[in-house]
């Protein structure tokens, strides 16, 4: 359940920055749709989960 909670938080972070990403992609001439973004959101979630685990391990090793 913790992973699902974290994944939801990661997706909320991604959605916060989505307008900025869309603007940059638009300027580069890349069309963004929800179908196109889904694989990148999944990748983002994997990256954030790994970064979270790395930070967690660091915090536990400092105790």
Image (spheres, helix red, strand yellow):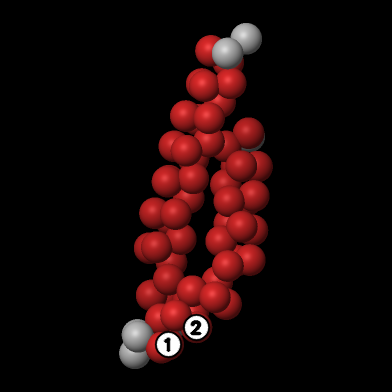
Residue drawn at point x = 63 percent, y = 33 percent: 2
Count of numbered circles on the image: 2
Q: Neighbour class for label 1 at 10 Å: few (<14), some, many (≥20)? A: few
Q: Neighbour class for label 2 at 10 Å: few (<14), some, many (≥20)? A: some
**62 to 1, vertically: above or below:** above
Residue situated in front as seen by the camera: 61 or 13:
61
- CB under 8 Å between callouts 2 and 1? yes
Q: Which mark is residue 51?
A: none
Q: Residue at x 42, y 76 (%)?
A: 35
Residue 23 - label = 2
Q: Residue 61 vs residue 24: left or right?
A: right
Residue 15 at x, y = what percent?
60, 66
Quarter of the picture containing the N terminus is top right
Work out which residue is located at the far left of the displayed protein and give it: 29
- Locate residue 63, reporting x and y percent: 62, 9
Considering depth in this image, is 56 or 63 the residue closer to the camera? 63
Q: Where in the figure is residue 20, as x and y percent of width and height?
A: 54, 75
Label 1 sits on a secondary structure element that is helix
Kindly give the residue lying farthest to the front in the view shown: 62
Query: Vertically, is 39 above or below 18?
Result: above
Q: Nearer the viewer, residue 26 or 11?
A: 26
User: Who is closer to the viewer here, 8 or 22?
Assistant: 22
Numbered mark located on residue 26 in the image: 1
What residue appears at the point 38 percent right and 75 percent down from the top-left corner? 36
Task: For marks 2 and 1, give the CA distance.
Answer: 5 Å
Mark 2: secondary structure: helix
* Residue 31 found in image quarter: bottom left
| Residue drawn at point x = 43 percent, y = 46 percent | 46
Q: Position of residue 27 (x, y in %)?
A: 41, 88
| Among the 4 quarters of the image, the one containing residue 14 | bottom right
């Amino acid at each position: 359940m913790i992973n699902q909670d974290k994944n939801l938080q990661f997706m909320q972070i991604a959605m916060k920055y989505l307008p900025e990403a869309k603007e940059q992609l638009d300027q580069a001439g890349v069309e963004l749709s929800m179908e196109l973004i889904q694989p990148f959101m999944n990748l983002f979630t994997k990256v954030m989960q790994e970064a979270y685990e790395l930070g967690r391990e660091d915090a536990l090793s400092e105790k």
